[in-house]
Amino acid sequence: MSMIKFRLAAKTDMGVVRTNNEDNFQVAADLTSDKMQWINNEVYSLGEKGTLLVVADGMGGMNAGEVASELAIETVREYFSSEKLTDEVLKNRYSIEKYMNEVIVEADARIKQEAKLRPETRGMGTTIVIGWILDGKLYVSWCGDSRAYVYNPVAGLHQISKDHSYVQGLVDKGAISKEDAFDYPDSNIITRSLSDGTAKAKPESLLKPYDLCDQDIVLLCTDGLNGMLRDCEIEDVIRNNEVDMDCLADELIKAACEAAGSDNITICLCQILEGGGICTPDTFESFDNRLAGKQRQETRVSSPDTEKTVKWYRKKTFLILMVCLILLVGGGCLFWMRGTDNKEQIETKNQEQESNQEKKDVSTGKDISTDVPNMEKGTDEVDIKSKEKQENGTPKGGKNPVKENGTGKGVKESEPVLMLPSDMEDELEQIGNKERIESEDILTPVPSEELEPVEDDKKQVKKEDEKENDAKVDKEQKGTTSPANKVQTMEYTVSSGETYSSIARKFNTTVAILMQLNHTKDARLNAGDIIWVPKK
């Protein structure tokens, strides 16, 4: 915070009713100096040890009240001398407030001691309020109903101290409102003061120091001002005279005298010109709430305007939530519908591609011819290669190399010959007919343990293979011959519902020979498959 510049003014007046003035006050522009002095409306810079404002309102009749207030002010002067304000006192907020309260308690003790020494002054007492401006903050301690205010053009006038009075107690309990307290009877009854019986004084401080703002006007006063003028009337006078503190002090005293002037009037003013913070309309909200009492707090909660505002915000929140919910549900439904449509389109496209591929394979047979080149060269070469692999140590029941035909089915080379009985062939045909589907049928494979090869057929095939190798059959013979029975073969496209059994009967052969020709043990056939069959 930059250097704070300010100006001061302080005045007291007897009023229009009283014949003596029991009030007292003290202002010190710079506590670093040994002399407590000031000049009204003079511009000062805030010193290291700050600036002091004090107001005391004496009570107790002729030559008594003014004695008490004078003793209080003298005690303050002594304790706020430069040598007394050590670094230990200025250490932090708590040490500062503690010191201010100790000063008030000491003033209380001195007044009581004086009353004992001078019987004519018994019953005297005084209120006191101390304002200490230090490091850009305003510290306030008080005892009684003398007040501290802060005015700012942005936020208006706000009371920051809290009266120790009977009426303020009623406000705190919610029995009356703060506005009604001004006209309430017995408003002059105070609950705390200096020299109040035998009990030690109980001063009070702000809940936290007030951070000064530019254009703030700090006002300390006795009840001769705020008991004659309402806060709104005091604010009007300040607003019309905020450029001149000396003139403002005169105008406030004048307004109080014109209102009634039944009590002494004392005022101390300090205007912050620069170096403070920025004031906002809610700067004084905590002070106002503290003074409001229970009734205002309950009224704020139950006021029609507040209820309407709360209801409106609730309705607005509900509508916003409903709109968000509708958008969320609608977006989810739209996303789901699009996802379903895309899935259906992909499935339809895949089915069309599969259908087109099947038609292409059936019509051209291109893949089969390219994937099984050895078949076109004749079964003699296939048989020779198969025998060479068996002689090289390939296990009889082991896995053999696999080639793919046009349908993606594996074509195993050099499989053992299997002969099926006729009754088993019929059973395979019946199973195939039962599992027929619209576009393709799957024939359930017969377990391998049920397909026992006939030993005679194996020997016969082996003998024929040996004769074929010895005879060196003419490779230029037209067509391709089967390694099993030397018959010519050709490609055949399987139709829907056909099985190895039905195809074997169609070409006057056996299922075992067909499986041998196609080098497979898998008895399943699909529509569109291309297999090798004997030529008719």
Image (cartoon, rainbow, N blue to C red):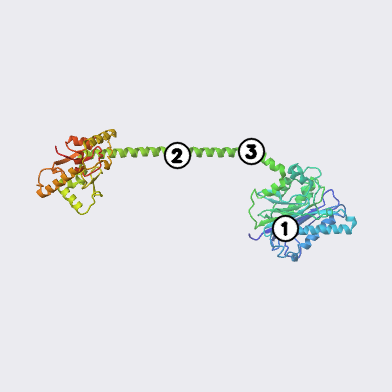
Q: Is residue 437 visible?
A: no
Secondary structure beneath disc 2? helix
Q: Can you give x and y, in whole percent of width and height, for residue 409 in the image?
A: 25, 43
Is 37 rendered above or below residue 307?
below
Among the two numbered marks 2 and 1 on one chain, the one whose residue lies closer to the N terminus: 1
Among the two numbered marks 3 and 1 on one chain, the one whose residue lies closer to the N terminus: 1
Viewer-closest of 267 and 317: 317
Say the numbered circle drawn on residue 97.
1
Contact (Cβ within 8 Å) of mark 2 with mark 3: no
**Residue placed farthest to the front in the image?**
456
Q: Can you give x and y, in whole percent of width and height, for residue 100 in the image?
A: 75, 58
Secondary structure beneath disc 3? helix
Residue hosting label 3? 307
Spatial distance from mark 3 to mark 1, Cα to Cα?
Answer: 41 Å
Between marks 2 and 3 in the image, the one whose residue lies nearer the viewer: 2
Q: Please indicate whether residue 345 sits to the left or right of residue 536 in the image.
A: right
Among the two numbered marks 2 and 3 on one chain, the one whose residue lies closer to the N terminus: 3
Q: Amino acid at mark 3?
A: Glu
Secondary structure beneath disc 1? helix
Say the numbered circle drawn on residue 173.
none
Residue hosting label 2? 332
Spatial distance from mark 2 to mark 1, Cα to Cα?
Answer: 64 Å
Q: Can you give x and y, in whole percent of width and height, for residue 350 in the image?
A: 31, 40
Q: Residues within 10 Å of mark 2 (few under 14, many from 20)?
A: few
Spatial distance from mark 2 to mark 3, Cα to Cα?
Answer: 37 Å
Q: Amino acid at mark 1?
A: Glu
**Residue placed farthest to the right in the image?**
119
Q: Amino acid at mark 2?
A: Gly
Q: Please indicate whether residue 480 sits to the left or right of residue 439 in the image.
A: left
Q: Please indicate whether residue 136 sits to the left or right of residue 121 in the image.
A: left
